[in-house]
Image: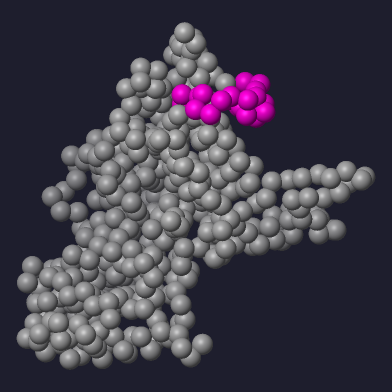
């Protein structure tokens, strides 16, 4: 019997997600023996053309990391959707748009002007901007079209499973891959990570007082955080209460508060909004002025609450036109 | 432009606002009025959801300070509104689009007045920025559905 085919592909991605696949170490060799990897641009030499030759549905699992911001990424995502029985959105960018999604706070024009004209290190005397089609020596050269915004993968194609994280930890990758090989996937649409919030497994949880009440909002670089005490109890913004568990607490372990790369907990669409409600409940203010004073200490709320999630947030999620 | 009618969602707590009046009568005078029990129930998600659904502004009417039937729901709502306003500002939506007032009006006559007042403010601001910095996006891509 032929081995099941798997494709691993990056769209708008930094490569960290591919790295985490490699981080499953020698298990990868067993995986490679059990499946036939038909595409993995970061590690193996396959061309997209060879992908087009595969019959529709011929790939058992397409693992896609990275967001979609240009026509090339969109095209590849759509080809993979056609060829794959199942699509796994891998990593925060594919699931929610990721950190690059913060670019949705600026227009395409702003971005181009900065990158090709205004940034202090730019030398561009002829004001050249990238064009989708240009003619050089009688030959037509093309570039992918840069879209107006960053999209999460499920804005572009149907996604069957989600594995969030920046990047997803190797043990969850392992679970996902073994589930694919053994054909033991949960219902479609599931996120292949725990359902509860990060606080549930956080070691600092026990240090939390009965009722957290803070009068100052601090940023992690402004204070020396106690490594054993709940960040929120110290007045440091930590997205643990609104963020899905499963990351392995890699940030907590180096005394950094949660920044939300695992996205919302099960059943929640927008963890930023949920965190606002959490945060409001722990603010201990005496008057309107006091509320205003404390709230003004929360610097760059959109950058913190939606660091990985902006394109998938309530305010920005693409409306599906039916 | 003079025809622009901003959409305003008004939440009000039944413990202080309009509880002596026939709700149906009053609701005929107010568009998008949501009387509820305790403003502390209004999550930040509901506020953002209202904007997604097309609202240009949100008015929340809670009980007077210190008089919440459930101890401090109105105070919680106030803090939440303050944080939501801060968030909206950071995504480029005017904070004036969300307002909370803690007071009492059993007859509810002031509700349509307050709504009207805020609507006039919203006319000055124009339609709320929604979704994205640019509006073209929905035509940019079409979604591909999976098999089965």
Residue A165 spot, x, y in % from top left: 41, 37
Residue drawn at 61 percent across, 53 percent down: A147
Q: Where A135 falls versus A110 (above or below)?
A: above
Q: Is residue B63 left or right of residue A14?
A: left
Residue B10 spot, x, y in % from top left: 26, 77
Residue drawn at 40 percent across, 81 percent down: B6
Residue A315 spot, x, y in % from top left: 41, 61
Q: Quadrant of the C terminus of chain A?
A: bottom left
Q: Quadrant of residue A47?
A: top right
Nearest the viewer among A49 and A115 is A49
Residue span colored magenta: A39-61
Can the viewer see residue B23 in this picture?
Answer: yes
Residue drawn at 33 percent across, 51 percent down: A269
Number of numbered labels in the structure image: 0
- Asked if the magenta segment contains residue A141, the reply would be no
Q: Residue furthest right?
A: A137
Q: Where A159 falls versus A284 (above or below)?
A: above
Q: Where A231 falls versus A83 (above or below)?
A: below
Residue B38 spot, x, y in % from top left: 14, 70
Nearest the viewer among A137 and A26 is A137
- Asked if the magenta segment contains residue A42, the reply would be yes
Q: How is the image coloured?
A: one colour
Q: Quadrant of residue A280?
A: bottom left
Q: Where A188 falls versus A258 (above or below)?
A: above
Q: Is residue A195 left or right of residue A112?
A: left
Nearest the viewer among A8 and A229 is A8
Can the viewer see residue A246 in this picture?
Answer: no
Q: Quadrant of residue A55?
A: top right
Residue drawn at 46 percent across, 67 percent down: B130
Q: Is residue A301 left or right of residue B109?
A: right
């Amino acid at each position: 019997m032929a081995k099941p085919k798997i494709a691993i592909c990056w769209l708008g991605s930094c490569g960290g997600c591919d790295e985490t696949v490699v981080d499953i170490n020698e298990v990868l060799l067993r995986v490679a023996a059990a499946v036939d990897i038909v595409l993995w641009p970061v590690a193996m030499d396959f061309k997209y053309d060879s992908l087009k030759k595969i019959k529709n549905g011929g790939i058992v699992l397409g693992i896609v990391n990275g967001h979609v911001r240009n026509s090339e990424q969109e095209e590849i995502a759509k080809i993979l959707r056609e060829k794959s029985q199942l699509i796994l959105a891998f990593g925060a960018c594919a699931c929610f748009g990721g950190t690059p999604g913060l670019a949705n706070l600026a227009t395409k024009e702003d971005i181009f002007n900065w990158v090709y004209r205004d940034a202090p290190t730019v030398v561009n005397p002829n004001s050249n901007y990238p064009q989708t089609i240009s003619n050089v020596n009688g030959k037509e050269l093309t570039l992918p079209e840069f879209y107006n915004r960053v999209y999460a993968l499920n804005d572009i194609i149907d996604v069957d499973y989600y594995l969030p994280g920046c990047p997803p930890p190797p043990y969850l990758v392992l679970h996902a891959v073994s589930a694919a090989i053994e054909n033991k996937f949960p219902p479609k649409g599931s996120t292949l990570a725990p359902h509860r919030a990060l606080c549930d497994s956080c070691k600092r949880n026990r240090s939390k007082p009965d009722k957290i009440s803070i009068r100052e909002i601090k940023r992690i670089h402004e204070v020396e955080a106690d490594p054993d005490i709940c960040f929120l109890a110290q007045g440091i913004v930590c997205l643990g209460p609104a963020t899905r568990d499963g990351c392995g607490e890699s940030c907590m372990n180096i005394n950094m508060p949660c920044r939300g790369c695992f996205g919302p907990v099960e059943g929640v669409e927008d963890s930023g909004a949920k965190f606002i409600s959490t945060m409001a409940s722990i603010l201990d203010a005496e008057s309107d002025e006091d509320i205003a004073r404390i709230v003004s200490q929360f610097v760059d709320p959109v950058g913190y609450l939606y660091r990985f999630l902006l394109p998938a947030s309530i305010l920005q999620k693409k409306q599906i036109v039916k | 432009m003079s025809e622009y009618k901003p959409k305003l969602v008004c939440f009000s707590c039944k413990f202080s606002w309009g509880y002596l009046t026939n709700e149906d009568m009053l609701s005929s005078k107010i568009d998008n009025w949501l009387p509820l029990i305790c403003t502390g129930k209004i999550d930040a998600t509901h506020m953002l959801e209202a904007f997604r659904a097309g609202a240009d502004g949100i008015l929340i009417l809670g009980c007077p300070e210190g008089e919440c039937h459930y101890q401090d729901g109105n105070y919680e709502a106030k803090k939440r509104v303050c944080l939501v306003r801060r968030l909206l500002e950071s995504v480029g939506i005017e904070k004036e689009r969300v307002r909370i007032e803690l007071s009492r009006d059993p007859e509810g006559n002031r509700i349509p007045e307050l709504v009207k007042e805020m609507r006039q403010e919203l006319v000055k601001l124009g339609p709320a920025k929604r979704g994205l910095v640019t509006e073209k996006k929905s035509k940019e891509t079409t979604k591909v559905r999976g098999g089965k």
